[in-house]
Image (spheres, grey):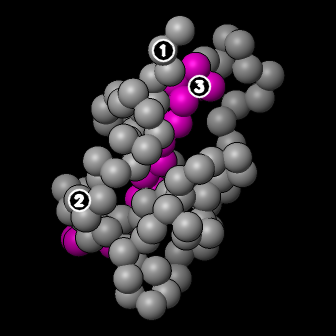
Amino acid sequence: MTEVWIALLLYTKTLDAQILQEFGSEKTCWEYYAGDQTFGKQLNDHQNKPITKDYHFKKGGAEYPIRLFTDRETKELMWLTCELQAGLDYTRRKYLLNILLPTPA
């Protein structure tokens, strides 16, 4: 069975989520959005450098960190995460997807 990874955009202001695209691997999904400005300004790390794979802000068990964006007009914080599609099948999961949102600075 082939794994399918989906890019999931989470909106912190409205608590909505949007599935963007499917990928064959978590790495392909994460790299696809490197430097992307489609959703707004992509946030950098505390040294104003692009977020790399080694960045600490990731879900438990994830290989790649969550990308952060801010909408240029509303300043809404958005998270972009790559999730295994099979892991989002709520008919087979005991618990719903749980991603803790940090307090925006």
Query: Which residue is under mark 1?
Result: 2
Residue at 43 percent of width and 60 percent of height: 67
The answer to whether 53 is drawn above or below residue 7 in the figure is below
Residue at 52 percent of width and 82 percent of height: 105
Query: Disc 3 or disc 2, which is closer to the eye?
Result: 2
Determine which of the numbered discs, if any, sits on residue 67 in the image. none
Give amino acid for label 3.
Answer: Leu
Query: Which residue is under mark 3?
Result: 88
Query: Which residue is under mark 2?
Result: 36
Give amino acid for label 2.
Answer: Asp
Query: Disc 1 or disc 2, which is closer to the eye?
Result: 1
**Relative to the observer, which residue lies in front, 71 or 14?**
71
Visible residue check, residue 46:
yes
CB atoms of marks 1 and 2 within 8 Å: no
Label 1 – label 2 distance at C-alpha: 27 Å
Boundaries of the magenta span: 72-88
Q: Measuring from the top left, give residue 32's x and y in whole percent.
A: 29, 47
Instruction: State the residue lying farthest toward the bottom.
Output: 47
Q: Measuring from the top left, give residue 94's x and y in whole percent.
A: 80, 22
Residue at 77 percent of width and 29 percent of height: 95
**Relative to the observer, which residue lies in front, 46 or 79?**
46
**Mark 1 crowdedness (10 Å alpha carbons): few <14, some 14-19, many ≥20:** few
In the rendered view, does 66 fall on the left or right side of 100?
left
Tally of numbered tags: 3
Q: Give the structural element (helix, strand or loop) at label 3.
A: helix
Query: Disc 3 or disc 1, which is closer to the eye?
Result: 1
In the rendered view, does 5 fall on the left or right side of 56?
left
Q: Measuring from the top left, give residue 47's x and y in whole percent.
A: 45, 90
